[in-house]
Amino acid sequence: MRAREEVLGRIRTALGEQRPPVAVPTVPAPRELPPGELLDLLAERVEDYRATVLRCAPGQIGPTVARGLHAALGGGWDPAGVVVAPGVPAAWRPDGATEDDGRPPVELAAFAATLTGVATAVAETGTLVLDGAPLSGRRALSLLPDVLVCVVEAAQVVPDVPDALGRLDPVAPLTMVSGPSATSDIELQRVEGVHGPRTLVVVLAG
């Protein structure tokens, strides 16, 4: 404690007795956006990250997922090469897709694409949050296949990060996705797919 007190004492001496008041920055209130504008903002931010956004009505999620897989994988894509989080509704799944059964994570890399839902999505930052629940699937599921297709429903979209954190279990294994996995080397050459999926498709229903 003696060294600590000595350091703090020197700091107090350097500052002097008459210290100016410290201005505490205020946090701006979150923007209040109508639901339609909130979805538009999310779509804009996600596209800024070079991801693909497909908008659809709630009843058209299944066909839109299939359209996204066709665009990402090509015309000859095989539904058996798509692994699905166990909580994804049957109506969203391509016929013949493989449900994740807890197999060793290394085996997931053999699949061409993953289909999951999300726990929530942040419009301001264009971030999708997966929480390890059955709808989101385990973390390895969203990281190993080369294509990730996430379905986001309108009610899951929130304006900013504090709103998102208020919806999440603080001890859940959260994965936050803001666009395809990408990194840059010392010459700032962007490389995608190094730490996760090379391609992100977001199906935005609402």
Image (tube, rainbow, N blue to C red):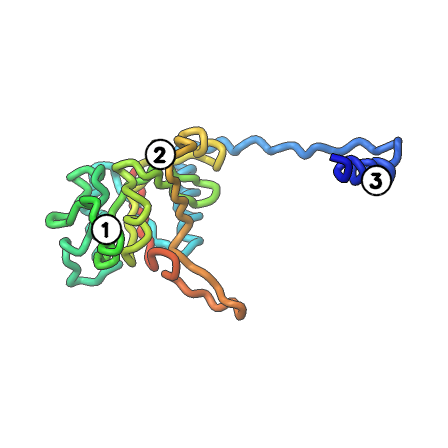
Badge 2 marks a residue whose secondary structure is helix
Tell me whether circle 3 and circle 1 mark residues in contact (CB < 8 Å). Answer: no
Image coordinates for residue 189, horizontal then vertical, percent: 48, 68
136 or 154: nearer the eye?
A: 136
Find disc 1 in the rendering and name its residue.
Answer: 104
Q: Which mark, by number, is residue 23?
A: none
Image coordinates for residue 190, horizontal then vertical, percent: 45, 65
Closer to the observer: label 1 or label 2?
1
Residue sitting at 83 percent across and 33 percent down? 20
Find disc 2 in the rendering and name its residue.
Answer: 156
Image coordinates for residue 62, horizontal then vertical, percent: 19, 44
Classify residue 95 as left or right of residue 132. Answer: left
Q: Earlier in the sequence, mark 3 or mark 2?
A: 3
Tell me whether circle 1 and circle 2 mark residues in contact (CB < 8 Å). Answer: no
Above or below for 134 versus 55: above
| Kind of residue indicated by mark 2 | Gln
Q: Which mark, by number, is residue 10?
A: 3
Classify residue 91 as left or right of residue 152. Answer: left
Q: Is residue 71 visible?
A: no
Q: Quadrant of the N terminus?
A: top right
The image quarter containing residue 206 is top left
